[in-house]
Image: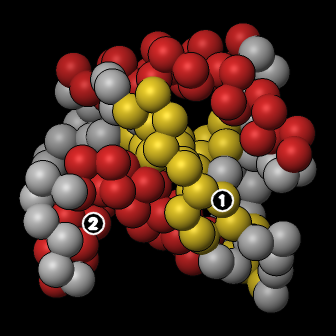
Amino acid sequence: MGLDWGEKRIGVAISDDELRLAVGYAVWPTGDLLAQLASTVESEAVGFIVVGYPLTLRGEAGPKARQVDRFIQTLLRYGYDVRRWDERYTTQDASRSLTNLGISQRKQRGKIDMSAAVLMLQSYLDANRVEEGSPRAG
């Protein structure tokens, strides 16, 4: 499962059983996250959660990354297996893709979070595939 954390909304993506393909799953309001997460982890048999980590263009952790660190600490306290993954440019790439599909900026609000989660999770899956269907531990 991939999560693109935001102050108001969380974009959610999941992968197939072979950990090859990320697909959009949902956009959750931040306030409902823990209940939605627990239900989804159980129903979808999620093994680990990849959280998009918003590094600056220089590759450093800024104020937004510190907020995500607090979010990750909450997930860890609930016992989830969490992995950070660089999410630089995912929101911009998702917005560009949606614009190319003819979706206006106004209508992108909910969709962009899920699209960014898909791009981030797919990047993680691609980078961590060592052998067919076997992701590196991360």
- The image shows residue 82 at horizontal and vertical percentages of 67, 36
Q: Residue at x 26, y 26 (%)?
A: 64
Quarter residue 29 falls in: top left
Task: For label 1, count other residues whose C-alpha is less than 10 Å away and answer few (under 14), some (14-19) or many (20+).
Answer: many
The colour scheme applied to this rendered structure is secondary structure
| Viewer-nearest residue: 98 or 88 | 98
Q: Which of disc 2 and disc 1 is earlier in sequence?
A: 1
The image position of residue 131, as x and y in percent, is 79, 84
Q: Which residue appears at 60% of the width and 70% of the height?
A: 22
Q: Residue placed at 88% from the left, 39% from the top?
A: 42
Q: Secondary structure at mark 1?
A: strand
Q: CA distance from mark 1 to mark 2?
A: 16 Å
114 relative to 55, above or below: below
Determine whether 137 is above or below 69 in the image.
Answer: below
Q: How many marks?
A: 2
Q: Amino acid at mark 1?
A: Ile
Name the residue nearer the viewer: 110 or 47: 110
Residue that carries the numbered disc 1 in the rendered image = 14
Amino acid type, label 2: Ala
Q: Is residue 88 visible?
A: no
Which residue is label 2 attached to?
94
Q: Are marks 1 and 2 in contact (CB under 8 Å)?
A: no
**From where the camera sits, is residue 114 visible?**
yes
Question: Looking at this rendering, what residue extends furthest in the bottom direction?
Answer: 132
Side (left or right) of 85 relative to 104? right
- At x 61%, y 14%, the residue is 74
What secondary structure is found at the residue carrying circle 2?
helix
> Which disc, if any, is residue 123?
none
Q: Is residue 101 left or right of residue 37?
A: left
Can you give x and y, in whole percent of width and height, for residue 45 in the image? 88, 50
